[in-house]
Amino acid sequence: MLKAGDTFHRYRIDGKLGEGGMGLVYRAYDPLLHREIALKIVRAEIARTPSGQLTEAAIRLMREGRAVASLNHPNAIGIFDVGEIDGTPYIAMELATGRLLSTFIGDKRVTVRQRLAWLSQIAHGLDAAHKQGLVHRDVKPENMMVCDTGEVKILDFGVVKRIAGPVVDPAEAPHSEPLQTRVGVVMGTPLYMAPEQALGEPIDGRSDQFSWATVAYELLSSGVHPTTSNNPRKLPIAFALLSGEPRPLAEVAPDLPPGVDAVVMRALSKLPAERFATMEAIFVELDAILEALGEPPSSSSDAHSSVTTVRPWSSASSASPNSSESSKSPESAEFSGSSEPESEEEEALDEPAPEEPGPRSGWPGSARPWLLAFAALVLLAAGLVGYRFMLK
């Protein structure tokens, strides 16, 4: 383990920010470019096989870091350097300060206009990633930071998937390049997954769009989740996601500006073909709504105080059904770039959905309830068998 004053490559270590099963994260200083950075270093026992070869995890980490490094956008965390020193893979990334978006859910001090401005920024960042052929796959409030500068940054591209060419028309880009998860491996956080993602089906930028809409629904309704809030029978998350229908956002948050409900609910459509074609179409709609409301706020400094960001490197893996991410203090903020490969937030899809406050309706309908319910059952059974096999 490195300590303050040590050097790694050209970087001076100023202290440890976090650690986990995959590696450690340090606050560091780059003397060449004269800036502070966050430095992720893979643990030696994880990085190499007994024969001295790079493990699949280490190789994927560097691939993903290089993929995200091509994304230069103010609403995405920056990757400055990816490499390997003395057999140890590392990623040098932007060190940001601010608060997680999740800490603002339910905060009455934040205006609707400000929330819409944040959602527009997230849509801009995701659109930029999609145009680079990158699908985030883990869009959620804990992976978004409201920085002290007023910008919102998308964090943690640890389970990013590269799809050949811009993610505009999925029919034009059906093949994946080397940055690809094994077929049938479900990546992401179940409460924010698109239905096709939960089923292990092919995904594209519209899958991130569904996750974005879930975040938007929560943020604009002061914490009401579109899936769990309309699940009176307390079905497992997978069943609730695939067979349930969310209440219209306009019912949950009736004071929203005209047009907001239509944008969010369309993006929450179960079928990708019924969503917007791109995230650009979403931020165009939101920006028009914001323009009608007046100039959006340029800074969020009045809504929060500065907190140095840190995300301990989670030790979860694709074989682990649970994650400890939800146990973090709500006041902690985070930084992240590329997280551990094939592992971030892979929670059990058969975990019962948590209760949500607010009125509940009867059994929700669906465009294809029996097909989706059967597919969910098959997915849950396969996951359980695979998990028990890996425990042997």
Image (cartoon, rainbow, N blue to C red):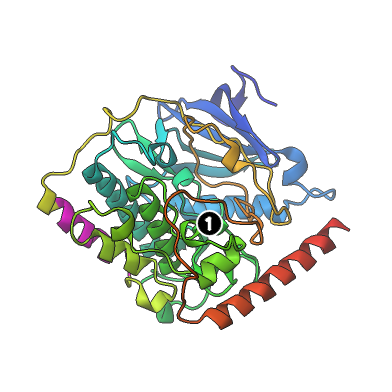
For badge 1, the amino acid type reads Leu
Q: Position of residue 322 (x, y in %)?
A: 68, 50
- The residue sitting at 30% across, 30% down in the picture is 303
Residue at 42% x, 57% y is 214
Q: Dominant secondary structure of the magenta stretch?
A: helix
Q: Residue 238's quadrant in the figure? A: bottom right
Question: In this view, which residue lies farthest toward the top?
Answer: 5
Residue 325 appearing in the image: yes
Q: Quadrant of the N terminus?
A: top right
Q: Can you identify the residue that label 1 sits on?
A: 191
In the rendered image of this protein, does residue 307 appear above or below residue 201?
above
Q: Position of residue 320 (x, y in %)?
A: 72, 52
- Residue at point 25%, 54% (across, down): 254
Q: Is residue 283 magenta?
A: yes
- The residue drawn where x is 53% and y is 79% is 369
Please rate how many residues cluster around mark 1, counting C-alpha atoms within 10 Å: few if below 14, some from 14 to 19, many from 20: many
Where residue 69 sits: x, y (%)? 45, 50
Name the side, left or right, on which 318 lies relative to 119: right
In magenta, the rendered stretch is 278-290
Q: Nearer the viewer, residue 368 or 356?
A: 356
| Residue 62 placement, left or right of 260 | right
Quadrant position of the C terminus in the picture: bottom right
Residue 161 within the magenta-colored segment of the rendering: no
Question: How many dots with numbers?
Answer: 1
Residue 182 spot, x, y in % from top left = 65, 68
Which of the pair 261/186 is nearer the observer? 261
Relative to 138, 76 lies left or right: left
SS category of the residue bearing label 1: helix
Q: Quadrant of residue 128?
A: bottom left
Residue 180 visible in the displayed image: no
